Image (cartoon, grey):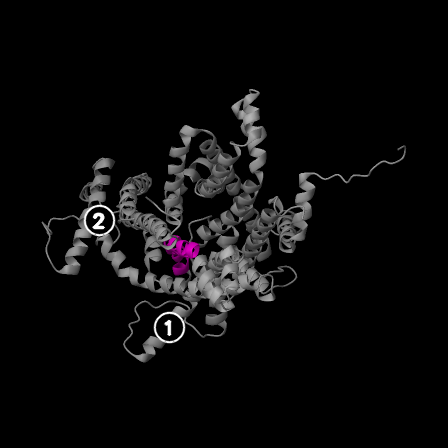
Amino acid sequence: MIQYIIRRLLAAIPTLLVISFVIFAILDLAPSDPTGNLPMTVPPEVREKIRISLGLDQPMYIRYYKWLVQFSVNEPLNILQHSFGVTIGDAENRTRILSWATRSPVIDLIVERTPQTLWVVGLSFLFGILMAIPIGIVQAYRQYSLFDQIGTFVAMLGFSVPTFFTGVVAIILFSVQLKWFPMIYDTTLEITSWDNFVLQIKQMIMPVTVLAFYQASQLSRFMRAAILDNLNLDYVRTARSKGRSENAVLMIHVLRNSLIPIVTLIALGIPTIFGGAIITEQIFRVNGLGQLLIIAIEGADIPTVQTLTFLFAILIVIFNLIADVLYGILDPRIRYD
Amino acid sequence: MDSAVIETEHRSMWTDVWRQFRKHKGALVGVFVFAFIIIAVFVGPPIHGVDPNAIDFKARNLSPEWAHPLGTDNIGHDTLAQMLAGGQVSLAVGLSAALIALILGTLIGVLAGFVKSLNGPLMRLTDVFLSLPLLPLLLVSIMLFRDTLRAAFGPETGIFLLIVGLIGVTSWMHTARIVRGDVLSIKEREFVTAAHSIGTRRHRIVFRHILPNILSPIMVSATLGIANAIITESALSFLGLGFPPDFPTWGRLLYDGTNFIQITPSRVIWPGVFIALTVLSVNYIGDGLRDALDPRLRGR
């Protein structure tokens, strides 16, 4: 297994290199100019100097190489230094990826915004899973019952109705009409007292529920199908015939086997929810990673966009690997050697 | 034996498929809803007869009334006329992007399954595409190429081509994988070997023997592709990086409406309901097609 993981990690490197080059190249084609937003009074010579200071006079492959080194060597070293409080190598002269818009290191912007995204997205994913698994079990066990039919319809509704509609309807109902929850997510809120804590919970309810509902509707369908696949297998009949209670058959034998594909699906789904968070954060004005990306795109802040997009790509590749490894660990029939 | 003409009912594959499809209530309702939306969107504008871009400052933020059945927006656009015009664009984007993805996916899937030397490279390409963070890349590419294409094809055609092309180019991967798997299994079957042995040319084998046999997974993924494309387009418009404001689509109308949800919530509700209805009906049609085209279920 260890050998397999190492082999997969080595195979991921060329994939990531290709992806990083594609992302860098697409963005490099941009006819955007970092000095475009400066006042008209700035003379052309100064503009040229700003461009040179940003390294734009160099050919593309050199800039790509520099960006790649900054991303994959310098920034990880900085994070190591920061977390262990030690100095590694020539820390002073190590260049960092700088945002064109704020002139601050992109990684700092990302670190600043990650907690908000993780709270909203992570919690909703967790609630989605917690809802989907029991619903899927009951649906499959009582196939074609009223509960199953309603569940199937709601699930179909849940993944057909885009989150940017359910989110806005939730705002209209619960913020505008009923005034239960705030319309805009206040990220400056610090939890210092019970009241603030209640406020934080209140503002998180809507975004988390909307995303969780969307996640649950997809997962519950897969859960139902996985249980149905297992219910008619021989080992279930064996378990019943040796006198195990119905509860034990379902909760111990069937559930454990049905969870194998579901765990993989959950692992594969984690990177996509970061993409989905782009939309949710835009609806509820959460200043997380998705909003950072949108602002960077609108402001033509190329380094920020490149770095964020590549980070999303790394997440996808890593979680694909995790899904495959989990599958091997959970299912003894699958051997990778 | 003179008059005993045995009446055999004519049964082709497609009548069987239709018979099975009719049993799926949701799919049947889906067909009616989808057909209704298409007809309404393309026949509605001449009947309603209001220019979607006509501005009337005297009739701002109206509630529904006889002249404006769905009310008006903050600068006096008629909401119904905008909904119909927006629907035309949204449906056109969805259908044409799904068609591009379908053609690309089938082509790549058939090539990878049928030509041994292309299998490896094409599947690696599919893997790379599946590892790309698509939504960020779509947003970025729209920002980058919007102005170039607008200059080349005019503001409306340019952005339409850009969005349709981008959605099509980034959503063929699942079709390609399914098609490749099916081609790999079908090309080993006896009838393909038989065709080879009588000297049928390779492209004839693909078109006459392989493609008809993988039609059902292609059709199912095509329907689901339409739903996906409509959602993607409205998501892009919702993020403000889709169609320009004077060129309404359902996603764009929803996005514009969110700033006025306290005054005219219906401006958000209508586009959202129509996106949801369209996607829901298309998904139900896909579900029904999957059942109807599955020969193990059909004919029971």
Q: CA distance from mark 1 to mark 2?
A: 35 Å
Answer left or right for B168 relative to B3. left
Answer left or right for A72 relative to B207. left
Q: Is residue B186 above or below residue A70?
A: above
Q: Residue at x 34, y 68 (%)?
A: A186
Answer left or right for A61 relative to B63. left
Disc on res. A97: 2
In what quadrant of the picture does the N terminus of chain B appear? Answer: top right
Q: Nearest the camera: A8 or B250? A: A8
Q: Residue at x 23, y 57 (%)?
A: A108
Disc on res. A175: none
Q: Which residues are magenta?
A: A260-282
Q: Quadrant of residue A261?
A: bottom left
Q: Residue at x 47, y 63 (%)?
A: A132
Q: Secondary structure at mark 1?
A: helix
Q: Secondary structure at mark 2?
A: loop
Q: Is residue B279 above or below residue B116?
A: below
Q: Which residue is mark 1?
A: A201
Is A269 magenta? The answer is yes
Q: Where residue A174 sits in the image (x, y, percent)? A: 47, 71
Answer left or right for B174 relative to B209. left
Q: Earlier in the sequence, mark 1 or mark 2?
A: 2
Majority secondary structure in the magenta region? helix
Q: Nearest the camera: A253 or A50? A: A253
Q: Residue furthest front?
A: A242
